[in-house]
Each structure stands twice: as structure tokens, then as C-alpha cells.
Amino acid sequence: MSLTSNSKSKKRFSLQLSAIIMIAVIAVSSLAFLLINQRRSSDFSYTISGAVDLRNWDADTDPAVVLGKGWEFYPHRLLTPLQIHESRSETGKAHYPYYQNVTIRTNGWTDLGPNYELYDYGQPLEPMKKYDIGTYRIELLLNPSVDYITVNIPDIAQAATIWVNGKAVRHYGSISVSKENYTPSAVCTDIQLEPNNDGRIEIVIQVANFSSAYGGIIYSPCIASSATVGTIEYSVRMYLTVLFAFWFFFFVGGIYISKTFNNKSKFYLFLFMFLCEILFEVASPMVTPLPGNWNTLLRITMLILSNYGTFLFFLSLYPPKASHLFDTTRFFEIILISSLTAMYIVVFWCFPQVLYLQSSVITNMVLMLICNAYNIFRVFYMNHRYEHGKLLYTISVILTTAINVSCFVRRQYFVYITLHSFLLLWLAVGFTLYFVIDYVHTYEKLAFNNKNLENAVEEKTKYITRVNQDLLKNHEKLLENEEARKKMMSNVSHDLRTPITAIRGYVELMLNAKEPLTREQEVQYLSNMHTRSVQMEQLISDLVQLTRMESENDKIEKMPVSIKEMVGDLFNLYHSECEGTEKVITFHAPADDDLLIDGDPKRLLRVFENIIVNAMKYTKEDGKIHIDCHRYDDPAMLGGNAVEVLVKDNGVGIPANEVPYVFDRFYRAENSGINKTGSGLGLSIVKSIMDKHGGKIWAESEEGKGSEFHIVFPPSEFSFDEEPPEDEEE
Ligand code: ADP
């Protein structure tokens, strides 16, 4: 058993190892793939007379170029390229104030920081978030031999028009200076750019970014060959696949581990919220379920609710009434987190503008942090107490913290995930798989132990049942013995009383005789009395012998005995007795085989005598008795070479239904006749002698036709090698 469990645990170990290796390989290869196709920053910060110089850049061989720097930004203005040019050419000075060398950062910030220059110093500086609308402009200088390149603009919030070399190539939503007339739309696009004859490309993007702290161009556009942009999209798709795989692992793992929790519904709520959130994040770049700000509201609500789900899930990890500490804090925690969650949701839905304050990012983060702090606190407590769940709880915490934080940090730019969060997700997948395997391992171990326990119980039950059955059998046997004892007592007393009564009868007859008895009468009475007393003596001696034989101390003394000789002597005796009567007794034994067996001669004599006397007794005057001694034909009988004495007669026989009982004590067949004296003990004594010799005895009989008694002994150990004897007839 220990061998099997050893090989099992080895199997499990290799399963875990291969799972980890598999994850590592996939993670490394996906990471390499992402790294190769990442929009790596080939940063062209320098400009030639206002244009980003890309003349030496080859779209096919060089990495994609991120247009993070070198933008002009016109606050408060939705300007067409024409208006921009007119404003410059008329006065030599810009008609509209604008910022130069603005940096577009990921996560929606247009950085006017140390790199910007305000062209017209007559305007006061304002923080970016104050600009509800604005126009971005950038000029690229390409090698004139380049036919076209592709620009990938991942995200613009909320409505925009994109101009390329003076032509409006895309409209998203409707551009408007007033909040009432503008329709938001998520922008995610690829545009093909064809340079002018001199290799110049001017990109102008008008953006209405009402009410959003993250408005404007949210993620730096990037230019590359169409093929490279395509590859970037593939990597995004691959990421989505990974995301689904992760979710799948998480879900399957969750179902497995949820078996160990006391409150599964909390875990399922956690899973459900998590699923909704992921689906929303995945679907939202393509589909916006609600118009404008409602989308953001819905997204934030889900984030808060999934956080609440996580909190409940962790709360349910710890069974109630098992810790004084958690029992005291439980109520307080539920009230605190539930009311905070409710408050957040109510505030965001009643005052949506709050969402767009930068501080709301921080307050959301605080809520997550409070919950995670509780979760981590619980996990540490659990780890301390439950050695087994250690890994599980720790991973749960890592997962939830990672998911919450990365969801929050990335927000709607989920699709263009950073390497950091990609790695985090792989970590999570790895851990999920690992703890699923660990769980299955433990579960199997438990099942195995259970099975063992069940088997042990089953075996014990079987044992007890067996013992019980033995006891019942013993009990029955005891009852039977008791019954037999009673029967025997009554038989003995009856069989003793009969001759005594007869003797007393004769004595009384003689005593009370009025006239003196004749000599013949006296002889007659005395001889009857003698017969009866012999009968009594025989019965008593039979009883003594039977009792002695049944006692444990009765041992037979074995020595080699020639059956041929012993039975032959008996035959001679009875043969001479039969002389002068009509009875015929014959004998047959092999000439050259003494038929040696190992036995107690005295007891054996009793066996043969009893059987021969019975044969004489239960045949008529002209009965024929044949005694046959030989080797038994069947090699299977008593190991082969056995010696059989067959005593056959043509007497009264035994009724078929009584044959099985003739070896029972005091059993006398119906047809044994009242005249034939007998105790019914002879054959039972014979049987027990045969048993002690390891022999067999059985009777075959047909009523009215005669009986056969087969007496078989195992051969003497000295007689095995003897030659097969020749027959001798008498
Ligand atoms: P018993 O003293 O009555 O002969 P046994 O134990 O020797 O007692 O035999 C039991 C019974 O088996 C007999 O009473 C008789 O009915 C039957 N029996 C034994 N041997 C023979 C036989 N050779 N032929 C017919 N019946 C026999």
C-alpha cells in the first residue's frame, strides 16, 4: 500500500511540476511575443522646424514609433487645420494661444509640464482638466519615397474629428463646444497616412472632452507599417485569450476550492462579480453599453461591487463562532464595508461629476485598500491556524489584490495593458493552477483515507459478523448436544430398564411359583436372565467405550496392521459359527498384498466385528454375507492406494431415508425388528473409531435386498511401494 501511495504522490508531484513548467513556458513565450510586438518607444523627440523627423525611420525594419511627444495643444478651441494655418500666417503670431511640445501620456494625461512652451504668453496657464475641448496637432516628416504608413490611435475620449493633411478622415461622436450638443463615443482606430510630395504629414485632432479628468487623447498614438500595427493587434487578441484562460482557470479552481468553504454563495458572488467585470472590460472597447458617462458609472459600480464580493468571500473563509477575535470584529466589519460600499455607489450615481475628480480615484483606492487590509489580516490569521489552507488563502489574497489594483490602475485602458499587469496575470494563472492541483491532491488524499477507513470498517464488520455467526453456530450445537444428551439419557434408561424388568419378571416368577419349577423351566428362566444381563453388560460397555472415545484424552496407539490378516481371522471365526446353519459367509483378499494400514488393532477389531455381526444379525436364516478386502480403485480417495473392506449382505436392508442416520447414536432403523437385540450404539462407536484413524465409512443399502458397508483406510506409510497384488479367492 505504501508503494502505491508513493507512486501516486510521485505522479502528483510530476503533474504539479509539469503544470508549472507549462505555465512558465507559455508565460515566457507570450512575454517574448509581447515584448517583440510592444509599442516600444522609439522616441523622436527632436523636431525639424516643428515636424517630428522620421526620414531615417524605416517602417518595415525599425520598431513602431510612439507619438508621445511633440504635440501642439490649443486649449478651448476646436480648430480645423485651415484655421490653424490662417491664424499663423495673418499675424506671424498665432491668433489662438497654444502650447508647444506637449507630451501625451498614457492614462489620459496631456502633460503640459516642464516640456511645454506657451506660444502666446498673454494667456494665463490653467490645469489641463479645465479644458473641456481642445485641438491637438502634430507634424511628421517622412522619407518622400514612403507611400503610406499606419497610425494606431487606441483611445480618444469622448468625441473627436481626425484630420490628415487638411482632410477630415474620421469623425467620432459629434464635436461641440457645448456639453448639450456633444455626443460621446469611444474612439479606437487605425488610419492610413499618405505623405505629401515633400514627405510631410500633418495630423490634427479635435477633441471634445467634457467633464472628464481623462479626456483628450488618452493613449499615445503610434505609427508603424500596417503589418506591425496588425501584429500589435494580434498581441492584444492574444492577451484577451490569456485573459479568458485565466478566467477559466480561476472559475474551475474556484468551483473546486469552494467545496472547502462553509458559505459557497459568497464565493460565487465574488466569482460572478469578477466575471461581469472582466466581460465588461473586454467588451467595452468594442461596445459601449450605455451612452456617455453612464458607461463610466456602470464600470465604477461594478468595480465597487466586485470589491464588496471579494470582501464577503474572504469573510466567509473564516467560520463563525470559531474565533473570539473575528466574532467580535465581524459585525463591525460588515457594517463598515457595507455602508462604505453603499455610500460610494449612492454618491457616484447621484453626483456623477464626482467621478471625474482626480480625488475620486484616490477615494476608490482607499475603499479597495480598506477591504484588502481586512482580507490580508484574515489571511494571516488563517495561515497561523490552518496549516493546510495556507497556500490557498495567500493566493486568494494575491489574486484579489492584484485584480482589484490592476483593474483600478488600468481602468478603461484595459486592452492596452502594460507588461506589468500582463505578468501579474500570468502569475495569477500559475498560482490558480497550482492551488487547484494542490486542492485536488488534498481532496484525493482525503478520499483515499476515507476509502481506507471504509475498507477497515467493512473488514471489521465482516469479522464481527463471522464471529457472531460462529457464536450462533456454537449456540445451536450446544442446544443440539443438550438435546442429544437428553435423548441419550432417556434411551439409556429405557434400554437398561428393559432387561432389568425382564430379569425381575423371571425372578418374581420363580419366587412366586406355587409349585416347584421343573428343571427345564429353571434352565429356561435362568438362561433368559443370563441373556438379558449380557445385553445390559454389552450396553454398559458400549456406553463406556463411546464416552471414553469422545473424551479429548482418548488417544489411539497406531501400529502397522494387516487388514487381510485381521479380517481373515474374523472371517474364520464367523465362518465356523455358520457351520451347520444355512448362512453362508465368504471372504476375498488379494494374494500378495497384506493390505497394511496404521491403526490400533483392538479398536479395528471392534469395527470389523460390529459390521460383520450386524450383517449376520440383519440377514435371514439363509443369508449370504461376503467380505471383500482390496485396494480402493479411486486414486482421489484418501490420497490413493487406500485399503477398503467391503461387507455385503442380502439381508433386510435399510430404508433409503434412514441410511444417513444409521451412524447416529441409538439410531435403529424401523425395520431392524424387535427381535434383533441391539442398542443402536455400535455404528456410532465404529464411526468415531474410523474418524480417529482418518478413515471413511459409509453404507449403501436397498430395503429388502441387502446392504453394503464400505470401510476405507489410508494406506500404511510402509505399504506404498508394494507391487499390485494378485487376487486370491476362497
Ligand atoms: P444395533 O445394536 O441396533 O445393531 P448398530 O449401531 O450396530 O446398532 O446399528 C444401527 C442400526 O443400523 C441397526 O439397528 C439397523 O437398523 C441398521 N443396520 C446396521 N447394519 C445393518 C445391516 N447389515 N443390514 C440392515 N440394517 C443394518
Image: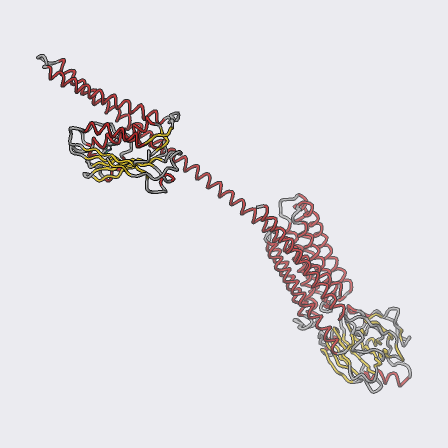
Tell me if 672 is positioned left or right of 334 in this view. left
What residue lies at 39% left-to-right and 35% top-to-bottom?
472
The front one of 263 and 364 is 263
Task: List x then y, in percent, for residue 519.
Answer: 11, 15
Q: How many marks?
A: 0
Residue 76 visible from this viewpoint? yes
Q: Quadrant of ligand 1?
A: top left
Above or below residue 370? Residue 74 is: below
The front one of 448 and 568 is 568
The front one of 534 and 499 is 534
- Report the colour scheme: secondary structure
Above or below residue 103? Residue 721 is: above
Residue 407 visible from this viewpoint? no
Tell me if 29 is positioned left or right of 547 in this view. right
Task: List x then y, in percent, for residue 637.
Answer: 35, 40
As drawn, the residue found furthest toward the left would be 515
The front one of 407 and 13 is 13
Above or below residue 249? Residue 704 is: above
Q: Is the C terminus in the top left, top right, bottom left or bottom right quadrant?
A: top left
What residue lies at 19% left-to-right and 33% top-to-bottom?
584
**Image quarter of residue 384:** top right
Tell me if 95 is positioned left or right of 653 in this view. right
Task: List x then y, in percent, for residue 502.
Answer: 18, 20
Task: List x then y, in percent, for residue 693.
Answer: 36, 32
